Amino acid sequence: MQRPTNPGMDSTARVSEPPPYRPIAFGPVDIACDGVSGGGFRLCSRTPLAPHDQSLSRMFRAAAEAGPDRVFLAERSTDGWRTLTYAASRPIVDGIAAAFLERGLSAERPVMVLSGNSIDHALLMLAAYTAGIPIAPISVAYSLQSRNHAKLKHVAALLQPGFIYVADTAPFAGALGVLDRTGIEIVASHNGAQLDGVTSLASLAATRPGAGVEQAVASSNANTIAKFLFTSGSTGLPKGVINTHGMLTANQQQIAQIWPFLAEVPPVLVDWLPWNHTFGGNHNFNIVLRHAGTFYIDAGKPMPALVGETVRNLSEISPTVYFNVPAGYAALLPHLERDGAFANNFFAKVRFIFYAGAALPQDLWTRLEAAAIRAIGARIPLISSWGTTETAPLATACHFLTDRSGMIGVPAPGVEVKLVPGGLTRVALTEGSLVVNSSQGGGTKDTWVLEAF
């Protein structure tokens, strides 16, 4: 069939125009860029950080009040999905929080979690926030892949936990066996190894909350320690980083201001990113918490043996926003390109596609755009941000459309960054993009460093 044309318009020009983006609401981009003594530039948003409640425990309770019957957490079970609503989560969280308080846990005797993402892990995390007691999620690799458990022993010695949780003692028996467990309570959802002295998580959840829980929630503030998050240890032994309630709630307020579309519909995430890392455990989980959304826990991984589980989950659940690392998109793209039904479900509701951890290769960017156009006839914004474990984590972010990879965006409200130039002559902001002109000739790449200011 011949495409109908408008006699008053060049049909060739119309066909060559890229398809429109799916509509999305971004916050305003209003950035100040000033020179600083000694060289370099200071960048900050002119939009102030809006007032917000600085307690994660109260954030959770607000979400439970906003959508009590909404599914909050979901994970695969033998007969489909195990789901938990906000209303059903609240008494479990309060019960575990009461048990934490009864045991006298504190920043000096925190909660340590060796297992990966799960509903029970999430409930423990929220209970720790509620009780005002730090939680420390630890990389599963330190327990299940290490031969000498050196990093696990190092982390445990630093934390001196009063409480260690594993989903099942069977796979973690070896790791637990190398730790000095004097004065430490071991708690598990399942005691597959039949270890002595293990407390069941169900018994903690059955604890009756008292006045202490309400007092802990009321007294939680910006300086209350939410978690001890450990760096990867790629350059040495892992280093513990304090994350406070104030850091995490401020980051969510920043996200709410730069990506206001998140408030239009409660977000739905299908997410595998580990909670011992700031990307999955702070950024993504708390986006769901802040907006009373739904978190589908994806047991897949961006590797050949496990990406099939991610494809299975995304074939059933359409996310409204999607987060992954470049390797994850490289693993998903072959499925998106050859399976039209899968692509249709993946792109059906997604408002933006987010990558972090590394720059997304431009060829993957182009292929993702092409897959979206085939599925829904529109482009989906692809964006990224930059941050660190210490910033909980977003510091700069794209909240504008861009047609190329590698853009880390501009400072979020309340953030100042210092740009230290190397052989640069001019830095300018044009339509939200950082433009750098180099004094070096011969095609030499511009170099620059973001520095704490």
Image: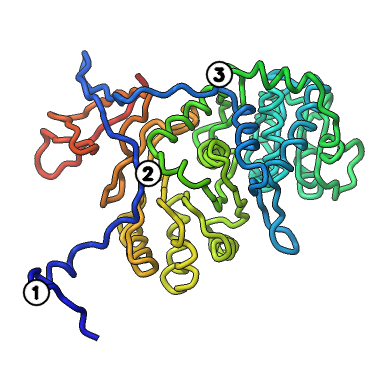
Q: Taking 20 as reference, is 412 above or below it?
A: above
- Which one is in front in this view, the residue at disc 3 or the one at disc 2? 3
The residue labelled by disc 3 is: 222
Disc assigned to residue 384: 2
Amino acid bearing label 1: Pro
* Residue found farthest to the bottom: 1
Element assignment for label 1:
loop
Residue 311 in picture, x, y percent from top left: 54, 64
* Viewer-nearest residue: 170 or 90: 90
Quadrant into which the N terminus falls:
bottom left
Disc assigned to residue 389: none
Residue at left 47%, top 32%?
393
What is the CA distance from the residue labelled 3 to the residue labelled 2?
27 Å
Residue at left 27%, top 26%?
419
Instruction: Decide which of tag 1 and tag 2 comes sooner along the chain.
Output: 1
Residue at left 31%, top 56%?
21
The residue labelled by disc 1 is: 7
Amino acid bearing label 2: Ser
Q: Taking 447 as reference, is 7 above or below it?
A: below
Q: Taking 163 as reference, is 36 above or below it?
A: above
What is the CA distance from the residue labelled 1 to the residue labelled 2?
41 Å
Does the image show residue 26? Answer: yes
- Which one is in front in this view, the residue at disc 1 or the one at disc 2? 1
Does the image show residue 281? Answer: no
In which quadrant of the rendered view does residue 152 lie? top right
Colour setting: rainbow
* Viewer-nearest residue: 213 or 333: 213
Amino acid bearing label 3: Ala
Residue 305 in picture, x, y percent from top left: 58, 64
